[in-house]
Image (cartoon, grey):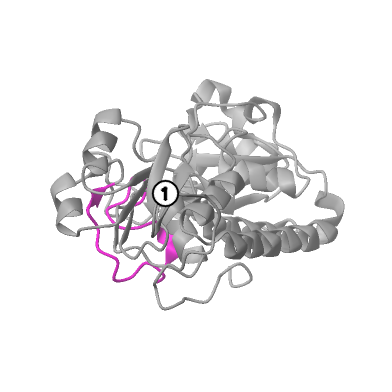
Amino acid sequence: MAALAVAASAGLLVACGSGSSAGEGARTITDGRGRAVEVPAAPRRVVALSEPTLDGMLALGLRPIATTGGRGQSGTAAYLGTRADGIPSVGALGRPSIERVAELRPDLILVDGTSIQDGAVIDKLRRIAPTVYVSRTGEDWRRAFATLADVLGERQRGDEVLARYDDRVAAIRERLGANAHATVSIVRWGGIGLPAVLMREIAASRILHDLGLRRPPFQDRKGPGHSVPVSLENLDAIDADWMFLGALGTGATGGVSEVPADVAAARDALRLARQTPGFSELRSVRAGHVVAVDGSAWTSAGGVLAAGVVLDDVERTLASGRSS
């Protein structure tokens, strides 16, 4: 991930993006729903209420004054590690406390389709501060990041971050060798013992496409913007030349788990999967090509830093021919 990370700045957002003037110290931008929003030219107190907006701010070297938990997690996404340490939480993903957000007196609030789609909630947030709906569910993560960078007045820095991503993708593609055209399955194994797969529009799937890798037929189509359950009778739908298997933690109460969705959780899920009839017969399993990965990066909304984790995992397995 170090190759994609951007050194942390002082934490203040400096306006250098484009947009039409909306008066001194403000710009008008068009958000992901086509709505014109007047935003500060130099926002200082930003609340990021989704995984991609938090990821994107950190990738730009910026820190919001508050955020929410990761998908299915009580804290921020596991793949962020210590990057998000010290950033207060205002609630679970998709369920922010309006009162806590208001108490922080933000000058900009960031949401997207991966976190909040309820117009009533967005209207309440708009009464607190300018609220930008950055992107819709399933939108290309690169486009969403570029929009975020522009909203924050950091278009040039955003372009530089994406250029580094492109450079790394090109370097890994050159090293794939015999795996250059491999099929790759992305699986989320649930705590109740049932698998789900990630479809074409999910960020990790788009990254695999950038690398020239292919998805198995069942997964190579547009989905609902999140995982699609697979019955045990159709277990072969999760198979491919390689399988990257993650989890979103266990012991969830009300959809929130106290167990991080990290590699350790994926290894626990893989042990459960191996007890499932038919799993050991899959060709990826027989070939030793099942890789336990951080589910918070691979099977969730993600962003630039999540992309770094995906590239790390592909590089150390497909580019080297080793599984873990």
Determine whether, in the image, residue 262 is placed left or right of residue 292. Answer: left
Q: Which x, y percent locates residue 121? A: 24, 35
Q: Which x, y percent locates residue 179? A: 81, 50
Say which element carries label 1. loop
| Span highlighted in magenta in the image | 70-92
> What is the chief secondary structure element of the magenta stretch?
loop
> As displayed, is residue 81 above or below residue 294?
below
Image point (61%, 63%), residue name: 156
Q: Identify the image quadrant of residue 11.
A: bottom left
Image point (41%, 63%), residue name: 42
Q: Which x, y percent locates residue 41? A: 42, 59
Q: Which x, y percent locates residue 169? A: 74, 58
According to the picture, the residue beneath numbered tag 1 turns out to be 22
Residue 286 in view: no
Callout 1 amino acid: Ala
| 261, 191: nearer the viewer | 261
Tell me how many marks there are.
Answer: 1
Q: Residue furthest front?
A: 23
| 163, 94: nearer the viewer | 163
Image point (69%, 37%), residue name: 240
